[in-house]
Amino acid sequence: MFCNQCEQTVKGIACTTMGVCGKNEEVSSIEDLLTYAVQGLCLVANEGRKVGVVDNAIDRFVCEAIFSCLTNVDFDPARFQVLINKTVELREGLKTQVAAAGGVTTFASAAATYTPGASVTDLETQGGTLNFIQTMDSNEDLRSLKQITLYGLRGLAAYTDHAAILGQEDDAVYAYVHEAMAALTTDMDLNGLVGLALKCGEVNLRAMELLDAGNTGTYGHPVPTTVPLGHRPNKAILVTGHDLKDLSVLLEQTKGKGIDIYTHGEMLPCHGYPELKKYDHFYGHYGTAWQNQQKEMPLFPGAVLFTTNCIQKPKDSYKANVFTTGLVGWPDVAHIDNNKDFTPVIERALALPGFTDTTDQGSVMVGFARNTVLGVADKVIDAVKSKAIRHFFLVGGCDGAKPGRNYYTELAEKIPTDCMILTLACGKFRFFDKQLGDIGGIPRLLDVGQCNDAYSAIQIAVALAGAFECGVNDLPLSMILSWYEQKAVVILLTLFSLGIKDIRLGPSLPAFITPNVLNVLVENFAVKPISTPDEDLKTILG
């Protein structure tokens, strides 16, 4: 196993036996094999587009397959076997169509002719000997740039899939995915690979725009909402991950059944959507970020539903209560297929004790996405001009178990009271329940939403820059981000593609970035690692 795709790599190099996420060598190898097989399909699909052969079903499948390899999504080898076999089946069928249209169907890369092993064990063996990130003269800097693009593509595929589930698609996004996956099988120089990576960020902005349109068009624009952190007597289901549609379907199916629905992790912002918060049994939030689930879920007295990414190995103490749906998978965990009949989840919740008492553990506010913040933009602008607001901090990103993340808690506590804090994604759980007061009636801590809502944060920054007639880099705004997996990678690429500079990143820099590639990022975008809260605040605020 050589997996260095997430922030929590062993000794900052790679996980070689068992990942912090729970991924073992077999799963890592088979994920690499699926990625390789998808590259072969993309080679054909990319050529197909040149002769007018476009298949939306293949486009959707490719994004699902790439997303499945993102950290904390699928750990089930049997499901990967199905995906690999389907990839090759689609590839061969597409070759026939492309050839009939006069297109090219032979390629230099062996990915286009790869034949899967017959069993899961065979696939693990094939994946274990695979070296599919090849570069000219085994150049480590080129390898690093290929990995940046590949991991960015995993994040892009995730956002594209989220959006497509809600009916929002753009063929240009699919075209880039095919083009980039195909390009990664070829030799490219440094400039070509830098361009490919930045294009990934540029295309991701469009994917996030589509996802924003899907979420807000279906469930309304989020509004400021108070979310209880305690519980009340009732049966209970805990929903984690990111998928709003799964939550919506579950809420509808549990109406009148005496079951309260609680959010966990990145589902917290869902409480702000009008079409979701209208359900009386959509009650509160339980727990914190993904990495704490093995501590928190054994204590939850109901069923647990995982949507999209963020699953860890379920402990035996609560494994029977866990269900997955969509692309999420764990061996021997019950899976709800795409018909989205959550009857097994509901029956399990009714069989469990649920909460039997009332506990008040305070509350938090959500719902400060772009519409809400820009709705009070005049007050914000006046407050900046009057110096009531000195500076904005965007403190967000992924949370994780690696030491050093207490930096973000301490930073939020030390940011002066004349500064605003925007936050999003699960990194906010380091400080989401802090009582930080307000400035002129506007809460100092504004929860913009999920990592999926990065588009909102970008639009807020762009709108403020427009109001002050300056560039985003000239705003009194500092971005201090935490990263863990590949959605964070592609968001960073999006910020780079927009020319945004002076981003502080932590708690550690990606292990797959070589010193020379890091120098390119520092020289062009002034990226810097976090230091200490006191030192960073002194540098930023003078």
Image (cartoon, rainbow, N blue to C red):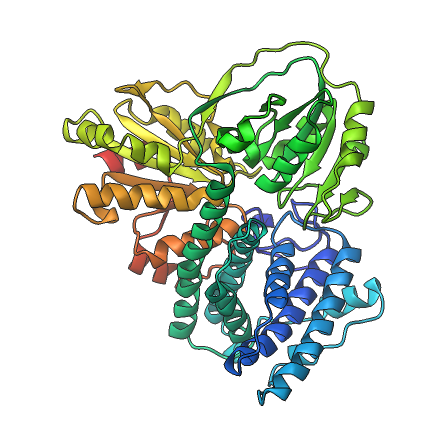
* Location of residue 47 with respect to 203 vertically, above or below: below
Q: Quadrant of residue 241?
A: top right
Nearest the viewer among 364 and 537 is 364
Residue at the extreme bottom of the image, as rendered: 102
Above or below 454: residue 103: below
Rendered location of residue 92, percent (x, y): 71, 78
- Viewer-nearest residue: 94 or 510: 94
Q: Is residue 321 visible?
A: yes
* Quarter the C terminus occupies: top left
Pinpoint residue 191: horizontal percent, then vertical percent: 37, 73
Locate residue 2: give its quadrant.
bottom right
Picture residue at 73% right of the left edge, 47% below the top: 339
Residue 143 seen in render: no
Of residues 224 and 300, the one nearer the viewer is 224
Q: Position of residue 77 (x, y in %)?
A: 77, 56
Image vertical order of residue 127 relative to residue 334, above or below: below
User: Residue at the location (34% across, 45% down)?
Assistant: 459
The picture places residue 507, in percent across and down from the top left corner, at 46, 42
Residue at the outermost left position: 386
**Quadrant placement of the N terminus:** bottom right
User: Residue at position x 30%, y 35% from top?
Assistant: 374
Question: How many tags in the picture?
Answer: 0
From the viewer's perspective, is 353 left or right of 511?
A: right
